[in-house]
Amino acid sequence: MASETLALRNGWVVTQNPKREIVKADVLIENGRIASIGKVGNADETIDAKGCAVIPGLINAHTHISMTLMRGIADDVNLEKFLEKTFRVDALRTPEDIKAGAELGAVEMLRSGCTSFVDMYYGQDVIAEAVDESGIRGFLGWVVLDEKFTTQKGSPLKNCEAFIDKHSGRERIHPLVALQGVYVCSEDTLLGARKLAEKKDTLLHIHLSETRKEVYDHQASTGKRPGDWLYDIGFLSERLLAAHCAWLTMGEIRKLAERGVSAAHCPVSNMKLASGFEAPVPEMQSNGIAVGLGTDGCSSQNRLDMWGEMKTCALLHKVQRLDAAVMPAQRVFDMATIEGARALKIEKELGSIEVGKTADMAVIDLRHPAMVPTFRENLISNLVYSCQGDCVRDTLVNGKPVVLDGKFTTLDRDAVVERAQIIGEKFFN
Ligand SMILES: [Zn+2]
């Protein structure tokens, strides 16, 4: 159990509040929430954050956590070959394998300061167990697709509904409706999913315009690009978080913006699969779309590393536009924190360190060689361009320390790693 009050003392607090203030202060956590920021008196427990930055927990806006066990088994091939390989392995997986993959993913993310992730998969029941036990926060989307394309038993939509019913109202588990993509989802399936999300008051999550092939195939079968078609059938809504959005036109961007859709940008996955060379992120942002950052699954990204994702995001847009100012560090850090929260419609709860919000935070060692020298003026730059996972010292979710001084207080890290290695070998062979 978390103690009633916990003080993080003397850190540089990167608030990510509307003024983006960075203050030297203590943070008091009471019953999982941020109670005050400033000079804090007595507390039941104290974490000394001197020489450290205290940041909002990072939000991974799109992944498939259990695919950690497919790390490195389908590299250096295009998307078609990649899917062929990963689907073959996927068909072999047991619920125990899925859970072991989720535990490994939770360890990797929590150890590197990521406190929330959005997941798209089937078998979310066992992923929810791993979320529960690890202490991470999961936005878990059960995948819905046309019945003729799925290996799920029964109706994917009904399975999704049962999953939502079982887990709604839980503290760190946020169930939602996920859709694989327009290439395996009919109009009926999409609108059924939208209706379910409305009925259950959850988010909707989909892969959208990830590859050129997806766009061309959809145009060939419907006469419309995916974004235009989804607008016309009445699928787009403010509940929707669309991953990738790599091949959107300006017309599609305006339609997404008009309907309040948000996006999850996955630059490393798009680059590695050579599927989408540069999503129009600056254009989405200038149209008011909330864009978060996602790693995608380990079969395509290989890591659940939000630090690498941030740096790659900045570099990709700069090099594509030959403009070093197009994606500044502050904007990228926003995407991993408060804009990620806005993309999940949960910015009143998460994404910044402000009084009243949920205490999801990470403590970064500013004396790590990769972070020196740091001062207020270059702190955000150092976080985006220099920081790496092992600069993270402590991670807190719901005010509870899940990682302290690099050590887990929840899972047995070594046991998780051993289990994952054994199962991974089975897939590899
Ligand atoms: Zn994905």
Image (cartoon, rainbow, N blue to C red):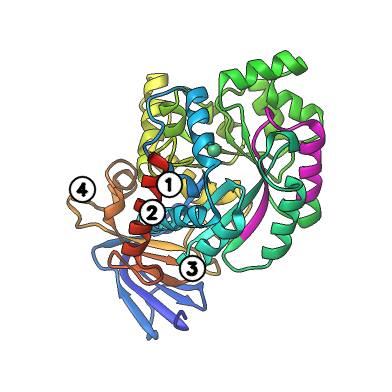
Reply above or below: 28 against 225.
below
Report if the beta carbon of the residue with label 2 is closer than 8 angstroms to ligand 1: no
Q: Nearer the viewer, residue 264 or 211?
A: 211
Reply above or below: 114 against 326.
below
Q: Residue at x 50, y 25 (%)?
A: 79
- Left or right: 42 in relation to 2: left
Residue at which label 2 appears: 420
Amino acid type, residue under disc 4 in the picture: Ala
- Residue 323 sits in which quadrant? top left
Q: Please provide percent x and percent y for residue 401.
A: 40, 71
Q: Residue at x 62, y 59 (%)?
A: 174
Mark 4 residue crowding within 10 angstroms, few (<14) / some (14–19) / many (20+): some
Residue at which label 3 appears: 133
Amino acid type, residue under disc 2 in the picture: Ala
Give the magenta-colored segment's residue range. 174-197
- What secondary structure is marked by label 1? helix
Q: Earlier in the sequence, mark 4 or mark 3?
A: 3
Alpha-carbon span between mark 2 and mark 3 = 16 Å
Q: Earlier in the sequence, mark 2 or mark 3?
A: 3
Mark toward the viewer: 2 or 1: 2
Magenta highlight on residue 412: no
Report if the beta carbon of the residue with label 3 is closer than 8 angstroms to ligand 1: no
